[in-house]
Amino acid sequence: MDLDHLLTLIRDGESENVEFKREPSRTLHREIAAFANAEGGYIIIGVDDDGNIIGTDVKAALEMVTSALSAIIPPPQIAIRKPSINGRNLLVIEVQKGASLCSVGGVVYIRVGTGIRPLSIQEILMLSAELGIITWDGAPAIALTEANSLYIDWFFEAIKQSRGKAIADEDRDRYLRSTGATKDGMLTNAGILFFTDAGRYIPHARIRLIRMAGGEPVWSREFEGPAWQVIESAYSNLLAEIQRVEVVVGTRRIRIEEYPPRAIREAIINAIAHRNYVVSADVRIFLHPDAIEIRNPGGLMPGVDIADPEHIPRNPSLSNLLYDTGFIERYGYGIRLIRREVEEHPFCSVSFSTAPNRFNVIFRRDMGSLIDETDRMILDEVREPRKSSEIAGEIGVSRTTAVRRLKILEGLGLVRREGAGAHVRYVAVR
């Protein structure tokens, strides 16, 4: 940390990532742990609450920091700096975001705003799952007798079809144990997701499809059941909402989906496979006029870089089941597949964003890349309703050419036709 960075932190004031202290307090151990359990941050000793630099006894402050660290389990990663500003000595503690939850006396604290608070058991479970400390999906949960035999039969038939493996009836129990679907004679959470109508036991294990218009929801549909059925139902419903548009490629006229179906399907599979099921929220798919957003409860696992993703599954047992049944093609390949499919699509782009407890995939439709200068001239002419003959005369092309291009622009959703017969007019869609 250079001096300019430090002065900027002090000038901007206290926040979720910055705490000022005149001198070390008896709660310093809780505050360090709270930063480590959140996103990390800075504790600056020798600055008052108003941001005035008053200085501190660095030696005495260091002794209290050492004592505070000894009370935190496991000890967080910190860096200590001892800058001096205008002859006043400061002690800066830079706390790194922890790879595991830190506790003080058996209590887990977290930084919220400019304060700290203890976490509930549910929040501890949620953060532990987010950090990959626990594998929620492999925990035994309900009696094996709750499994639907038809879903189990489907599973083994799907293995045979997708992986070419025929599992003998007498080996089924062993195979389910090896995948993590069962443990100690019980269905695990992964087993619940795959072999029961999961919503009975995990109410938020569903996908919600929401049509948006003008920033407001128009309708929504919910898809529940075993995970594989939820994926198929949500995907088929979403695919039915995606339009096929007519485009000209070279000398050929073809019809193509406005979004790449394979990439959409992969994003839905990833949302089910890698979401944090401890978070009480469902997977949501927002269908905007010019975009599809898939919002997944749970951020990226620690150590995963979206630019070069590696396979670090939050739900390894569920991932095994999805791989066996052909939903996951190859471990660690999902985001790469999405990017490749989008790159090959003529008018779609994709972006990924991650935040605490949330991961978003956004597919955007950009029709502008498909139109040339003649098309733009047509669009300029149809700001108000116009006949095709009027448009042709204004831009200097034949009426046949104008009609052909208007049909393509209509298919792209850029032009709307009004009226019928001799009264047909074309107008730009705003």
Image: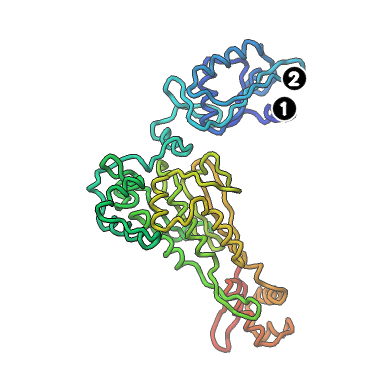
Q: Indicate the amino acid at tag 2.
A: Ile
Tell me, yes or no, whether the two marked residues, 2 and 1, touch with CB atoms within 8 Å: yes
Q: Is residue 226 above or below residue 317?
A: below
Q: Indicate the amino acid at tag 1.
A: Leu
Residue most toward the left? 145
- Disc 1, SS: helix
| Nearer to the camera, 253 or 144 | 144
Q: Is residue 182 above or below residue 412?
A: above
Asked which quadrant contains residue 367, the reply is bottom right
Q: Position of residue 410 (x, y in %)?
A: 58, 76
Residue most toward the bottom? 422
Q: Is residue 156 above or below residue 407?
A: above
Looking at the rendered structure, which numbered label has been put on residue 7?
Answer: 1
Q: Is residue 15 visible in this depiction of the protein?
A: no
Q: Position of residue 311 (x, y in %)?
A: 51, 47
Q: Quadrant of the N terminus?
A: top right
Q: Is residue 346 visible in this depiction of the protein?
A: yes
The answer to whether residue 8 is left or right of residue 418 is right
The answer to whether residue 89 is left or right of residue 301 is right
Q: Which residue is rendered at x = 65% and y = 11% of the image?
A: 59
- Disc 2, SS: strand
Asked which quadrant contains residue 246, the reply is bottom right
Q: Position of residue 339 (x, y in %)?
A: 58, 57
Q: Position of residue 415 (x, y in %)?
A: 60, 74
| Nearer to the camera, 271 or 355 | 271
Q: Which residue is mark 2?
A: 85
The answer to whether residue 98 is left or right of residue 4 is left
